[in-house]
Image (cartoon, rainbow, N blue to C red):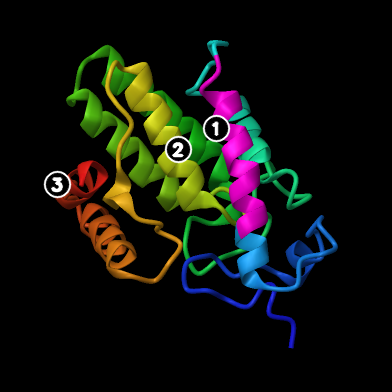
Amino acid sequence: MNHTLEPDNAAALLTPEEIRDLIPAHIAYRSELNEAEQENIARAQEWALGPRRRDLLSEKFAKALHRRMLGDVWRWAGRFRTSQRNMGIDYWLIPTELRKLLDDTKAWIEFKTYPADEIAVRFHHRLVLIHPFPNGNGRHARFMADLLIMRLGGERFSWGRESLRDPGIARQQYIAALRAADNHDIAPLLAFAWE
């Protein structure tokens, strides 16, 4: 059995077509895949945190960041998913719903609808709900929220201070906080972001 892409309870299931888009030929195990993705993400963080000011709240940036985060590992990085998932909205609604989120977030900022950290956490939650990419959505949404809170003058979130890819306590708390936000209670996710 190929252990490379077996479900790990922390990632969305990929279609066979998406699995064929794995770039590194040497990967044989999930741990090697996670390591390759993490190295790619570290380079993406350097790029995103660099001195150039980017239009953070744009579809172009969201796609570019995802491509930077996973583009050395997956050919589909930076492209919206084209199949249904057990999470997220219908794939054909992704561009429309992302545009609504970006516009809503700009309005929240302009009209000071919420405190800055709550704006970033609400943005994160909605981006996770949309689930725009085949995989890497949680990591992408957390980093987007970190960039947003920093743009608004705050510090990066800690997101439980543990790897959320591992099925431990932190991941369980994160999922529970996301579910509470699904039910219009943002407080647990906001608390978790600072934990």
Q: Residues within 10 Å of mark 1 (few under 14, many from 20)?
A: some
Q: Amino acid at mark 1?
A: Gln
| Image vertical order of residue 73 relative to residue 157, above or below | below
Residue found at the far bottom of this picture? 1
Q: Residue at x 85, y 62 (%)?
A: 25
Is the residue under label 2 in contact with that under label 3 (CB below 8 Å)? no
Amino acid type, mark 3: Ala
Q: Categorize mark 3 by other alpha carbons within 10 Å: few (<14), some (14-19), many (20+).
A: some
Between marks 3 and 2 in the image, the one whose residue lies nearer the viewer = 2
Percent across and percent down for residue 53 are 53, 11
The answer to whether residue 74 is visible is yes
Q: Which residues are magenta?
A: 35-50
Relative height, residue 133 to residue 52 (above, below): below
Relative side of 90 to 181, left or right: right
Give the image location of residue 178, x and y in percent.
Answer: 29, 56
Look at mark 1 in the image and give the residue it sits on: 45
Circle 2 sits on which residue?
143
Horizontal and vertical percent position of residue 147: 42, 27
Q: Say what secondary structure mark 2 lies in.
A: helix
In the picture as drawn, the residue positioned furthest to the right comes out as 25
Mark 1 vs mark 2, CA separation in Å: 8 Å
> Along the line of sight, which residue is nearer the eye, 115 or 150?
150
Viewer-closest of 96 and 156:
156
Say if 194 sits above or below 163 in the image: above
Q: Is residue 131 visible?
A: no
| Quadrant of the drawing holding the N terminus | bottom right
- Name the residue carrying label 3: 187
Q: Earlier in the sequence, mark 1 or mark 2?
A: 1
The picture quadrant where one finds residue 19 is: bottom right
Contact (Cβ within 8 Å) of mark 1 with mark 2: yes
The crowd level at tag 2 (other Cα within 10 Å; few <14, some 14-19, many 20+) is many
In terms of sequence position, does the residue under pointer 3 or pointer 1 come before the other? 1
